[in-house]
Amino acid sequence: MENDKMIAVLIDADNVSDKYIKHIFDEISNHGTPTYKRIYGDWTKPQLASWKSVLLDFSITPIQQYSYTAGKNATDSALIIDAMDILYSSNVDGFCIVSSDSDFTRLAARLREAGMYVVGMGEKKTPKPFIAACEKFKYLEVLAQDPESQAESPAGEKNEKQKSIKEGLESKEELIKSIKGIITESSDEDGWANLAVVGNKLSRRFPDFDTRNYGHSKLSSLVESLKQFDFQRRKIGNSKTSYYIKTKIKN
């Protein structure tokens, strides 16, 4: 199971604010159990001072890396070397790389080549190549939202905070186009496709796809809010419900 994975959490302190730390570990718990918890930076710099109490609260090991040469990021190199050491130790099933820096693109790709489950986390400024190299990618601004603001709102409504967050795909229009394509590939003779299948294919195609990016906590409520699709609930047995969607036919 996905949430049984042992995950090494490696954080780039130069590119992540300490205000996100609780949300990072809350999200990791949805994917597995954090084993290694390391954060990299030059701890002699005053701008990293706010991390000190956070490290104790979450039992994160700080890795000191001096900036030997101006313009060169020694922190990135230290994180990459540690990641490869952990990979060869065979003690983990996956990695969580927390950074908005594209320098970790090749690392994420290499870890996945080795069969590792790789989750990336970063701010909305994170370059697309790093996002694409991860199996899953989570936007820190989305994770840090108040759960109340993620409650499903009526179709067409989105508060200003939600509007400011970069959506997982290029736009909602691209999301709709992608769902339509998946339905065409996966539907039965009547045009209905299982929503779980659609969701799995979306996640594989777009590592940063997350219903929370669109202000919804579940895929079912997101799709139900889109006017381009018919939505159907089907009872299976006494308790289980399956969801199906179909592209509406224009009259």
Image (tube, grey):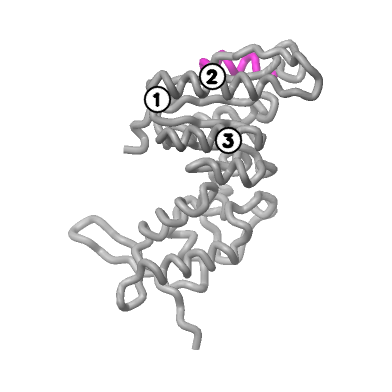
From the viewer's perspective, is 33 left or right of 157?
A: left
Quadrant of the drawing holding the N terminus = top left
Q: Residues within 10 Å of mark 3 (few under 14, many from 20)?
A: some
Image location of residue 26, percent across then percent down: 49, 32
Q: Element under label 2?
A: helix
Question: Seen in the image, is 189 located left or right of residue 88?
Answer: left
Which span is picked out in magenta? 50-59
**Distance (Cα) linking label 3 and label 1:** 19 Å
Q: Residues within 10 Å of mark 1 (few under 14, many from 20)?
A: some
| Of marks 3 and 2, the one in the foreground | 3
Q: Give the labeled residue for mark 2.
A: 82
Quadrant in the rendering for residue 45 = top right
First in residue order: circle 1 vs circle 2: 2
Would you place residue 226 above or below residue 169 in this image? below
* Distance between mark 3 and mark 2 Cα atoms: 14 Å
Type of the residue with mark 3? Arg
| 150 horizontally vs 34: left or right | right
- Characterize the magenta stretch by its predominant secondary structure: helix
State the mark number for residue 106.
Answer: 3
Instruction: Give the alpha-carbon distance from disc 1 to disc 2, as whole Å.
Output: 13 Å
Which residue is depicted at the point 25% across and 56% down? Answer: 240
